[in-house]
Amino acid sequence: MLQNRLEPVLDPRALARALSNKLLIDGTLVPAVSGRTFPVVNPATQERVADAAEGAAGDVDVAVKAAAKAQKSWAKLAARERGKLIQECGRLLNDHVEEIARLIALETGKALRTESRVEAGVFADILTFYGGLGSELKGESVPFKPGMLTLTQREPIGVVGTIIPWNVPLLLMALKIAPAMVAGNSVIVKSAEEAPLAVLRACQVMNQILPPGVLSILSGDGPQCGAPLVEHKGVGKVTFTGSVETGKLIYKMASAKLIPVTLELGGKSPMIVMNDADLDKAVDGAVIGMRFTRQGQSCTASSRIFVQDAIHDAFVAKLKAKVDAMKMGDPLEEGTDIGTIISQQQFDKVKSYIAFGEKAAGAVAHRCSALPRNKELERGFYVQPVIFTGISNDHKLAREEIFGPVTCVIKFKEYEDAIRQANDSDFGLAATIWTRDLKTALDATQRLEAGLVQVNQNLVVQANMSYGGIKQSGLGKEASLESMLEHFTQKKTIIINLN
Ligand code: ADP
Ligand code: MG
């Protein structure tokens, strides 16, 4: 299958051009039926780097039919064999980490060293992790009556529709396609309008190993291409990461067909820093948690930081100093820590939140780092990170997901009050508490309303740890064995009467 093995292309602009006007359907790169395309823009310069194929309902239909056909033989392979092929994809992708990293940096504006290269590496790692879980697709036998053999088995659902956003497109795609395929489903991905290239390249690499039709990817607009995928009668399951608003629309479309959905939506994650915390570690945790290197474009961003009164001012000063030391610049340069916001639309939105926050009585916007001075980046969507103080938890900035480098540090006196405010949110994705007191730490883990609660650390998604929100943050878990079993299989009960 690998006679004409793809060679890595390290010039991201050349690779972007080569991936122009292509969907990947049934193992083949094809233009959209309509022949239409849409521009892919480098957010650091506003240069047009590619024209992505604009898929629509007709392309969805072709892809679903091919996927349904491919799924039948895919499901007949032993689960461990499927797993081995997915692991082989992971190994092959290791050779493509650098080209894919550069492509992510080019299309999303995320810095190569701090973000894009890390993401490309994690993609391969997630495939390797799930590839090892094939033999876990086990059923149960249930004691029933003498002479009766009762058992359950896990079966694939069929064709899985996967819709992903632009902020960490490869990682989020991996968390969906890997468990879905190991479980015996075929998958069709609809990429985000802003970031269609790196995910297409990754799927192209994987298609050197996978049978045609098992993994297809379409680019196109949400309502024109994503919605027909969700609504297609050949699609038996939808898994989505994106905004709450779109998540609810997808849930509604899926309910008309009564198919299961997994939804990973927004967040407004609290971080509680007690007076007795290790201040330096907490500050480092805030830098990581707020994803300043990703311009705050993360659903788990620690965008509400509750700091106890005695250390509040020191915390803000240290946090500002840390972010000041980070370099904003060309995403493709090794020295750059912070790149750009994804698009004009998000840039305007983030700016308007900052302007609105500045109007609040008592609010102070501490602007950090410095905008790049290079002439070629002057049209880039760069936003200086902002740490707000003097914003209350009921202010718009503390309630809504900004998806930009903006965090609110909110002073509190009593622990009880911090817990109450942390939980006073529509979201429930992630939360952290920073303290040296074991009793306080344990108490907080029990009371914080979030799918992921961490003490004295702020790690990102980890393979093998269930990840997913409660409240408006979503439905279901990802990244774990549980995700594969609960979200990509259906259980059948079999009763055999031996009497
Ligand atoms: P944002 O627009 O803030 O990036 P969205 O949640 O709208 O976030 O987008 C996430 C993904 O959902 C993208 O791939 C987008 O194309 C897709 N999408 C948007 N609207 C719809 C829709 N009505 N039906 C299906 N998919 C959609
Ligand atoms: Mg949208």
Image: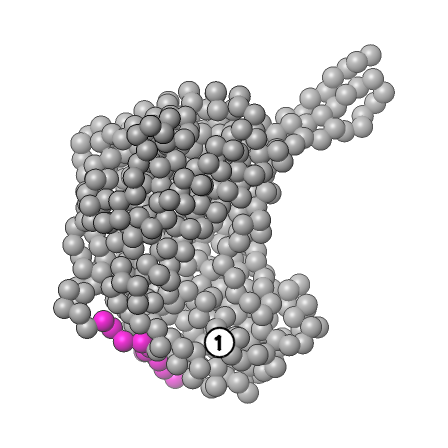
At a point 27% along the width and 63% down the height, the residue shown is: 333
Residue 110 in the figure: left or right of residue 139: left
Query: Quadrant where the N terminus lies?
Result: top left
Residue 208 in the figure: left or right of residue 278: left
Q: Give whichever of 83, 434 is nearer the camera.
A: 83
Evaluate whether residue 492 shows in this view.
yes
Q: Give whichever of 225, 177 is nearer the camera.
A: 177
Residue with the mark numbered 1: 283
At a point 24% along the width and 35% down the height, the residue shown is: 22
- Label the magenta part by its dominant secondary structure: loop
User: Which residue is at the far right?
Assistant: 146
Q: Amino acid at mark 1?
A: Val
| Secondary structure type for disc 1 | helix
At a point 29% along the width and 69% down the height, the residue shown is: 328
User: Which residue is at the far front?
Assistant: 3
The quadrant holding residue 38 is top left
Residue 442 in the figure: left or right of residue 20: right
Residue 367 drawn in magenta: yes
Evaluate whether residue 194 shows in this view.
no
Q: Position of residue 211 (x, y in %)?
A: 41, 26
Residue 419 drawn in magenta: no
Residue 80 in the figure: left or right of residue 365: right
Q: Position of residue 363 (x, y in %)?
A: 38, 81
Q: Position of residue 252 (x, y in %)?
A: 44, 40
Image: 282 above or below 128:
below
Query: Quadrant where the C terminus lies?
Result: top right
Q: Position of residue 128 (x, y in %)?
A: 50, 42
At a point 54% along the width and 64% down the height, the residue shown is: 431
> Magenta residues?
359-372
